[in-house]
Image (cartoon, coloured by chain):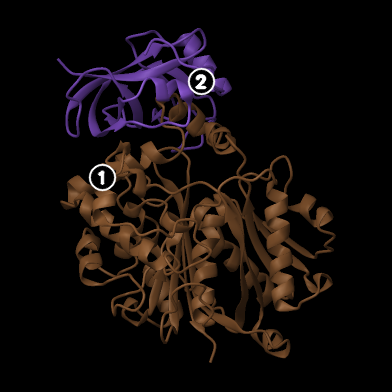
Amino acid sequence: MNELPEFEASRLARERAAQAVTGELTLQRCPDCGKIQYPFRELCEHCLSDGLYWSRVERNGMVIEAVRVHASMHPFFRDHAPWEICSVALDAGPRVIAHCRDAGIESGVQVVVSDEHVGPAHCVLVARIRA
Amino acid sequence: MRRRQARGYDRIAVAQPYTEPYLRTSESGAAWFLGRTLAGVLRDSGIPKSAVDGLAVTSMSLAPDSAPGLAEHFGLSLRWLESVPCGGASGVIALQRAARAVQAGDAEIVACIAGDASTGGSFAQLVSRFSRFSMDAVWPYGAAGPNAVFALITAAYMRRHGVRREDFGRLCVEQRENARQNPLALFREALSIEDYLAARPIVEPLHLYDCVMPCAGGEGFLVLDERHAESLGLPHARVRGIVERHNAYASDLVQLRGGWAEERDALYEQAGVGPEDIDFIETYDDYPVVSFMQLEDLGFCEKGGAAEFVRSHPGVVGLGGLPHNTGGGQLSMGQAGYAGGYLGLVEALRQLLGRSTGRQVADANLGLVSGFGYVNFDRGVCASACILERSA
């Protein structure tokens, strides 16, 4: 998937897309407790601190579950079906949903999750099996 | 420290179940379905509009309008107005708010109404901007709408507990059986386990009959003091207990349990009964795995035991098991937006009043209704449950 249809992204998602580097993983970190956050948010989930900042974080994680999407309400995704997505528990802390970029991604598999730019203003998470 | 028990709901009456019939699509807006629901409740109860001094509103498609706008739109002068945006947990929560308002004397007659529109494509638009988290962290993965999130949950549940598609299928087939005589259900044709298993995949392991059909419609009821209901000659049920819990077990990697597990002891303690006393149950069935979790977390069986429970306790009314989703549930009736979060309560009320539109549970004295909703990211945030009793 090299492009996505236009979708409404939050201010924080756009800010992140501008800072993220394909192949790395950039998420919010709390300046006070250090907790890595996801999804993008205004304040720290743990200590409600202000000033979350974008930070390169550990990309390794374990697949919680992976599923194959056949039907979507959006024509773009319908045209590209079926495709696979997974939920991942990152070693850095949070859970994320990501596109599967390798075959064989299933529950319990160790993966690397990284950013991938899709279109000028958007950046998604992709998972690959850890070498 | 043991937490203090909440004050009970003595003398709170729930009356006048009403369903504004569901339509697959309609050009009418949410206010039409909400207003028709209010009109239906008033007409069937004989209560004049001017006597309603409290209103609780639930809708996902009402924007840019909101509850105060409806007061003006419907010509209501109110001294109590509430908006309950907790998705599928909203019916029970609206009842809780209304019951407390009546107990406190802040309102005398509260109409609780939920309604949603369904114009072509409107559901896709709504889910594409359901919440900030879902816009940023779910939609770009093609997972807009809850199907993909619940596929992840269903797959994890099947793996953890050794459950097969047939196990979920049994629940869907039973609910369809309950729906077959219910004129309010959108889907009344027979559904076999073979039909269920042969259905096309939506997001594996979910297939067509695991998913609810979005539609338009409304659900409503009245809340008032029991003595007041008696003086008006209004048949009613009593509230025995209500609980809610939001964002429970937030650190679980995947949602295999909900807030009911944390609140069930409080619920049964407040009601003075246990799961063995319940005559029928209405769970929130946006997906069968969610109903399985409710059966477990509300104490009808052990965690992971729902498949066996459903096998050994038929949910079809009249078969001697535990009647479950007696009107067919959302899986057979359709999901009229957030009104789906009132459906179980309205159906339970009909059962307790002996007014089922489909299959009536014999000797229905105690009904349990549970709600679940608001998928913000990778799980439902809100859980609620209540126990209602037939008024002698």
- The front one of B187 and B366 is B187
Disc number placed over residue B14 in the picture, else none: none
* Chain in purple in the render: A
Residue extending farthest bottom: B392
Q: How crowded is mark 2: few (under 14 residues within 10 Å), some or many (20 or more)?
A: many
Q: Name the residue under label 2.
A: A13
Q: Residues within 10 Å of mark 1 (few under 14, many from 20)?
A: few
Name the amino acid type tagged 1.
Ala
Q: Mark 1 lies on which chain?
A: B
Question: Is the residue under label 1 in contact with that under label 2 (CB below 8 Å)?
Answer: no
In what quadrant of the picture does the N terminus of chain B appear? bottom left
Marks 2/1 same chain: no
* Residue depicted at x 64% and y 44%: B61
User: Residue B232 in the image: x percent, y percent?
Assistant: 73, 86
Name the amino acid type tagged 2.
Ala
* Residue depicted at x 40% and y 18%: A124
Q: Name the residue under label 1.
A: B198
User: Residue B389 in the image: x percent, y percent?
Assistant: 49, 82
User: Which quarter of the picture shows residue B312?
Assistant: bottom left
User: Residue A60 in the image: x percent, y percent?
Assistant: 24, 22
The reply, left or right, for residue B336 in relation to residue B297 is right
Q: Mark 2 lies on which chain?
A: A
